[in-house]
Image (spheres, grey):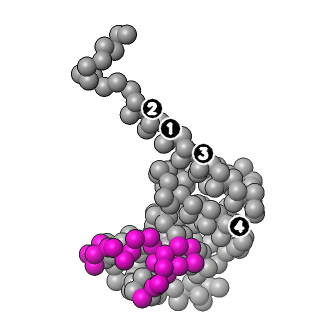
Amino acid sequence: MELLLAFLLTAVPQEDDPTLTAMPEGWVSGKKSGWDGDYPPEWEKKTDEEKQKFLELWNRAKSRYIRSVLGAKGLPTGPVTAITYMLKAVNAGLTCNASADIAIFGQGKKLKEADFKIMLKAASSAYGTEVPHNEVVVIVKDLVTAGLLGGTLDQRIRAEIMKRHRQIVEDKAKKEKEPKEGDGKDPKK
């Protein structure tokens, strides 16, 4: 395991310029997005410059994760496997930073590989919702800290994300219906 981490660390430049790491192969020649896909959603619509910026974000997040687990002992989910799940989560629409935050947290909680995967895959269900990804990180942390694992963790993360999405949508609808100052309606009535 340490040999794999050492190899991975030599492949990733140390903090100086994370943009030096090559584009993941799927991002270059992939066929679809999603958890089991090759690239992030709407990748094919991005310009080369946008793709390069996204790669920089990914490499910073990956480097931050690697630094956080460097020298850690007893990680049930190996760092290489965790990075693979992080990449799958990014391909499923989770932001690079949220993916790294959740992975770092999962390693800190010593989650076994199956639960680690469930945690990141369920968090990816936030893609296409109104839920900010920093809130997704909080939802995941709260549920894992509460001791949920396995299928229960998966269901609860997805349910909490959808609950929050509906709440945000309802709040927006209420705000749009409220009379605005100067729209001809008397706010005192």
Residue placed under numbered mark 4 in the picture: 115
Q: Secondary structure at mark 1?
A: helix
Check disc 1: other Cα within 10 Å, few if <14, some if 14-19, many if 20+.
few
Q: Residue at x 33, y 73 (%)?
A: 45
Residue 6 spot, x, y in % from top left: 54, 86
**Residue sitting at the far front:** 184
Badge 4: few (under 14), some or many (20 or more) residues near its Cα, within 10 Å?
many
The residue type indicated by label 2 comes to Lys
Q: Quadrant of residue 21?
A: bottom left
| Mark 4 to mark 1 CA distance (whole Å) | 32 Å
- Report which quarter residue 172 is drawn in: top left
Horizontal and vertical percent position of residue 112? 72, 70
Q: Earlier along the polypeptide chain: callout 3 or callout 4?
A: 4
CB atoms at circles 4 and 1 under 8 Å apart? Answer: no
Q: Quadrant of the N terminus?
A: bottom right
Q: How far apart are the two marked residues, 3 and 1, measured between alpha carbons?
A: 11 Å
SS for callout 2: helix
Circle nearer the N terminus (3, 2): 3
Question: The residue under label 3 is which amino acid type?
Answer: Lys
